């Protein structure tokens, strides 16, 4: 019997372009393969032991002759390639239309309504990176106290403000106003608060970021596990991606390393339920910044943390490691990439060396976790629990 499921999502962990990748401008993308090539090969002994080498050709990653885990890869059925769609799908909710994006900034009438709602004019309103936009408009923001509004290739409405002139709680209130305003057809996936500090040419974003996400359209695995009386713990930005729904506890740490440490603590104290973890820095610090070397170093560091994670597993645990989309740092752009994601399953009493093949949807993993935790079935997905249990 499985009493505890741990889902570790490495944000942006792609392993090859999906058949429809060209429709998203992502033909030929392969985050892991291209990162491995960029650094002359990866050193991932624990990922190797779980079966990662059987998923594709990645320089330096060998195929274990006797994998400790079950392995495969998953395709996304959802429209789009953002973190919300990826996480929702692996929790059983397939997004059938992409969240809107704004490559030319937000419509003037929408911005005018937002300005009226918060009683302030805004600066920016264009596509930009977070560091770029605060350097460009930060000094003017300090003079005027006008918030900086910007977006990216993702479906996001981001608001940046200096903590010295706009208290963080005020920034959060502005984000709540934006979230209330942004309904269909402008229902973006996330409104993001981006507080920063410092002086011109030395502005620094702080850890006060907060995401205000649209709520899932259907019952997710988190909702169903909660309804079944299971503890549901979200670590990292899980709370933000699910708009807080279904969680019995949320933990936000300052870094991926800290989130991994928090995960180990939870494994030592919580004997059952669903523990869902997101490691965001692969996406935000390396994928979006086209830093293949940083991406490689972070994955090797995660590999070094996995022995501690595996040692904390109990006999009735199921550990699942995957991604939510790709973010190939070797492509010309800085957007997410439309890719397969890895599927690695390990547990002390689970089958070993089973090839789970190519799953048609991330929701297959969600349905498997739902069956393992004995919740009601999800709307989408086909469970592969029998293969993991028996081989």
Image: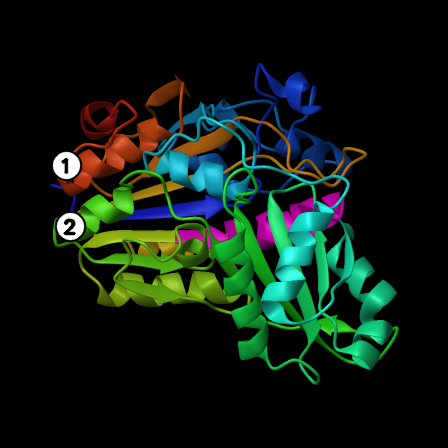
Kindly check if marks 1 and 2 are in contact, taking CB atoms under 8 A apart as contact.
yes
Q: Residue furthest bottom?
A: 164
Q: Is residue 70 left or right of residue 326?
A: left
The coloring applied to the image is rainbow
- Judging by the rendered image, the residue that carries numbered circle 1 is 376
**Label 2 SS:** helix
Quarter assignment of residue 351: top left
| Residue 340 vertical placement versus 349 (above, below) | above
Closer to the N terminus: mark 1 or mark 2? 2
Q: Residue at x 47, y 23 (%)?
A: 75
Q: Position of residue 127 (x, y in %)?
A: 76, 47
In the image, taking residue 39 as reference, residue 171 lies left or right, namely: left
* C-alpha separation, residue under disc 1 versus residue under disc 2: 9 Å
Given residues 258 and 254, the one toward you in this image is: 254
Residue 152 higher or lower than 243, as above or below: above
Q: Is residue 210 visible?
A: no
Magenta stretch, residue numbers: 277-303
Residue in the picture at 60% in, 43% down: 155
x and y percent of residue 226 in the render? Answer: 19, 52
Residue 19, picture quadrant: top right
Q: Main secondary structure of the magenta part?
A: helix
Left or right, 79 with respect to 378, comes to: right
Q: Quadrant of the N terminus?
A: top left
Q: Is residue 301 magenta?
A: yes
Q: What residue is shown at x 18% (from left), y 38% (from top)? A: 372
């Amino acid at each position: 019997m499985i009493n505890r499921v741990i889902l570790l999502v490495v944000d942006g962990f792609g392993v090859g372009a999906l058949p429809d990748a060209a429709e998203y401008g992502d033909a030929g993308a392969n985050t892991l393969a291209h990162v491995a090539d960029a650094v002359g090969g990866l050193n991932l002994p624990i990922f190797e032991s779980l079966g990662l080498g059987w998923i594709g050709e990645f320089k330096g990653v060998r195929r274990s002759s006797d994998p400790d885990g079950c392995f495969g890869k998953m395709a996304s059925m959802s429209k789009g390639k953002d973190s919300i769609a990826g996480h929702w799908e692996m929790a059983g909710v397939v997004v059938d239309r992409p969240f809107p994006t704004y490559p030319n900034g937000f419509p003037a009438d929408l911005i005018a309504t937002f300005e009226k709602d918060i009683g302030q004019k805004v600066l920016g309103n264009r596509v930009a990176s977070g560091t770029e936009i605060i350097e460009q408009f930060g000094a003017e923001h300090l003079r005027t106290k006008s918030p900086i509004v910007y977006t990216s290739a993702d479906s996001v409405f981001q608001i940046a403000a200096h903590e010295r002139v706009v208290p963080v709680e005020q920034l959060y209130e502005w984000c709540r106003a934006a979230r209330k305003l942004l309904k269909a057809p402008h229902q973006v996936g996330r409104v993001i608060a981006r507080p920063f500090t410092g002086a011109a040419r030395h502005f620094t974003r702080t850890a006060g970021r907060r995401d205000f996400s649209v709520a899932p359209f259907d019952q997710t695995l988190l909702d169903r596990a909660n309804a079944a009386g299971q503890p549901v713990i979200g670590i990292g930005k899980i709370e933000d991606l699910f708009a807080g729904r279904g969680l019995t506890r949320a933990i936000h740490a300052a870094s991926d390393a800290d989130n991994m440490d928090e995960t180990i603590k939870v494994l030592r104290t919580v004997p059952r339920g669903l523990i869902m973890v997101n490691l965001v820095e692969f996406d935000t610090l390396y994928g979006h910044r086209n830093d293949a070397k940083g991406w490689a170093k972070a994955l090797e560091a995660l590999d070094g943390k996995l022995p501690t994670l595996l040692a904390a597993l109990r006999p009735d645990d199921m550990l699942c490691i995957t991604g939510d989309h790709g973010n190939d740092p070797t492509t010309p752009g800085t957007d997410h990439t439309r890719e397969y994601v890895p599927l690695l399953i390990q547990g002390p009493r689970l089958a070993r060396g089973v090839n789970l093949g190519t799953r048609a949807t991330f929701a297959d993993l969600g349905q498997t976790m739902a069956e393992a935790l004995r919740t009601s079935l999800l709307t989408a997905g086909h469970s592969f629990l029998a293969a993991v249990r028996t081989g």
